Structure formats: structure tokens, C-alpha cells
Amino acid sequence: MDHKFCAEYGDILIRPLRRYDIEPLRQWRNKENISRFLRPVGQISKSQQENWFEQYIHNKDVLFFVADYKRFRSVGTVALYSFVNDECEIGKLVIGEDSAKGNGLGESLILMSMCIGILYLKQNKFSLVVNKMNLAARHIYKNIGFVEQEQYFINDTDIEIRMEIERGCIMCNSKTKDINLFEENNKIVRNLGGGGFYHSVNIYFYLSIANLVFCQEVA
């Protein structure tokens, strides 16, 4: 889906996927150390990636984000998809640049995208699936608060685990109060408990998710 939702946490920015992003994404997805825990699709060609992007921008059931680190390079992706009422799935988490791994980036991307889901899409529950052998990803998800629900075989040898987390658990995470949410190129200030303001350079609207929760609790 072509959207305008963004989030910022420290030196990390997640923003909408654009056409100029798709070649780095293709190269990341074709790396063996990344693709080994993803559904097998083989090596992706440039034309396949172009076709995928054209389908994506017209798909109302997927919000894809690209992660920029320190505002000058893209390092990964995350997505929200399969929306049903106030629940959706989160996934497509990829840290494509080796230099960006090992500093909590994956956890931050998951939290940032879920905060977008809570504020703009009114989501109250998020679920994901992870390969049982992907111990690093499972560790990240458990740290955030995801709870294992079920395990099942996807073929003769591979097992996936389904995990879920609810909105209340997300809001208890200490990082959420420092995650700023905004719409790309939006000059309109929304004031929810003093959480909105103009960005002095990019004229982006920022809104703290912690202020949103406070306003909802006292309303």
C-alpha cells in the first residue's frame, strides 16, 4: 500500500517503501544468510522485483517500511499486513546490512511499526510467525513480549511458531515513550495532550505514542 506513515526512535527512521528502495531490498533478500529462514522463492531477478513492487503499491492489505539508520543509509525492512478488524500480522523483518546488526535494531523496528499500527490503524493485537531454528529472532520477539501460541510443520523438516502480543503489553515497553510518529510531509499539527509539534527542518508532524495513551486513559 502506498502510505505516508513514519516513526523515529533515536537514530532510526522507518518510512514508506519507495521505488528507489527495491534494488537494495532485492539484494538483501537474495543473501543466503537472510533467505534461509524465509519462505523459499529462489533468487529474485530485477524484473520480478519490479513486478512485486507494482503489486505492492496497489495492495491495501500490506504496509511496508524501510529502515534508515542515522538518516543517511537504508539498513532493513519491516511490514504490517493481513488486517482483520483490530488485529494484524507483523513481519518481513530484514536487517540487510551486516554493520547494523547486533545493536537492538530488529527490536526497535518491530516496536516502531506496531506503534504506527496502534495510532493510525487502531490495531490492538499483533501476531507473527518465526522459524523454530531462528533463535535470534525468537529472542527478539520474546524480549518485546510476544507469547508463543502454537507450532506447526510447514514441510517435512521445518517448524514455524506463531506468536502474539496485545496492545497493553506494547505500551508497557519502556521504549514506546520515545518513539515519535508522524505522517510524511504533513504540515497539519494534531494536538493530543501536547504530543504534536512541527519539525523545524523537515516540517514533519511528530506525535509521542505515550501521550496518545495518556489521552485515551483520561478521556
Image: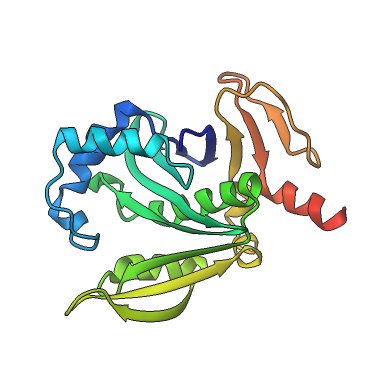
Residue 68: x %, y % from top left: 39, 36
Residue 159: x %, y % from top left: 27, 77
Residue at the spot 48% in from the left edge and 65% down from the top edge: 127
Residue 102: x %, y % from top left: 32, 56
Residue at the spot 46% in from the left edge and 38% down from the top edge: 1
Residue at the spot 28% in from the left edge and 39% down from the top edge: 52
Residue at the spot 30% in from the left edge and 26% down from the top edge: 20
Q: Is residue 21 above or below residue 172?
A: above
Q: Is residue 200 above or below residue 197?
A: above
Q: Is residue 69 visible?
A: no
For residue 20, side relative to residue 17 (left or right): left
Q: In the depicted view, which residue is nearer to us: 207 or 3? A: 3
Q: Is residue 32 above or below residue 184?
A: below
Quarter of the view holding residue 166: bottom right
Residue 19: x %, y % from top left: 33, 28
Q: Is residue 31 above or below residue 136?
A: above
Q: Is residue 162 visible?
A: yes
For residue 80, side relative to residue 219 (left or right): left
Quarter of the view holding residue 125: bottom right
